[in-house]
């Protein structure tokens, strides 16, 4: 298999980019489209796939990731537990791992987030100064599915890992 010269590949990419800009909108709009994270938007948990008995599963869980500007995101978490109790948590944090407040969460009072790739978010949550969980959110290539890997400390010191599956709402 013969490889194309690097200059030809770059020129082809540039031509495709200019064609897309000419047919779809301005080059600024195209650049913004490609730099926006696929994580942004609202996601609902597929509770049927949770590894707990149905009676213990929440009725609904909805995450919303929103760009708050200046490399900062706001995360809203809305949960309706099995008995009907509702919790609405929110936190705004820079994407550089700086610890920030989390409001109204039964699980955490502070958190930190980093985004190592446009489709990945790593979140560390603390309560009372103690790390209570680390979560990794990954948007799948279809852009409509989100996988959360949550790691919690177990009672015997062995980490517990759980995987949750979300579907894009908007």
Image (cartoon, rainbow, N blue to C red):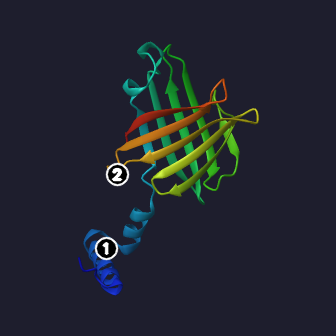
Q: In terms of depth relative to the viewer, which is nearer, 68 or 166?
A: 166
Q: Is 17 located above or below residue 122 in the figure?
A: below
Q: Residue furthest right?
A: 129
Query: Could you say which quadrant of the image residue 27 lies in?
Result: bottom left
* Left or right of 39, for residue 15: left
Within 10 angstroms of label 1, few (less than 14), some, or many (20 or more) residues? Answer: some
Q: Residue at x 66, y 24 (%)?
A: 156
* Percent coordinates x, y for residue 141 in the rendering: 34, 51
Residue 101's disc number = none
Give the residue pinned by disc 1: 21
* Percent coordinates x, y for residue 74 in the rendering: 57, 46
* Percent coordinates x, y for residue 95 in the rendering: 60, 54
CB under 8 Å between discs 2 and 1? no
Callout 1: SS? helix
Q: Residue at x 50, y 16 (%)?
A: 84
Q: Is 83 located above or below residue 103 in the figure?
A: above
Query: Could you say which quadrant of the image residue 127 lies in?
Result: top right
Q: Residue at x 67, y 29 (%)?
A: 157
Within 10 angstroms of label 2, few (less than 14), some, or many (20 or more) residues? Answer: few
Q: Nearer the viewer, mark 2 or mark 1?
A: 2
Q: In terms of depth relative to the viewer, which is nearer, 134 or 28?
A: 134
* Percent coordinates x, y for residue 23 in the rendering: 25, 72
Mark sitting earlier along the chain (2/1): 1
Give the residue pinned by disc 2: 141
Q: Residue at x 54, y 22 (%)?
A: 86
């Amino acid at each position: 298999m013969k490889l194309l010269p690097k200059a030809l590949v770059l020129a082809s990419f540039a031509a495709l980019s200019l064609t897309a800009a000419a047919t779809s909108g301005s080059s600024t709009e195209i650049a913004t489209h490609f730099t926006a994270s696929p994580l942004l938007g609202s996601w609902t948990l597929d509770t049927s796939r949770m590894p707990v008995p149905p009676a213990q599963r929440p009725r609904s869980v909805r995450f919303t990731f929103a760009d708050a500007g200046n490399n900062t995101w706001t995360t809203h978490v809305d949960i309706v537990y099995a008995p009907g109790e509702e919790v609405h948590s929110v936190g705004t944090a820079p994407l550089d791992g700086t610890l920030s407040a989390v409001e109204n969460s039964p699980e955490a009072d502070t958190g930190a987030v980093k985004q190592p790739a446009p489709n990945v978010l790593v979140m560390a949550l603390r309560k009372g100064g103690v790390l209570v969980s680390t979560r990794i959110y990954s948007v799948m290539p279809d852009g409509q599915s989100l996988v959360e890997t949550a790691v919690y400390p177990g009672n015997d010191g062995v980490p517990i890992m759980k995987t949750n599956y979300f579907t894009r709402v908007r």
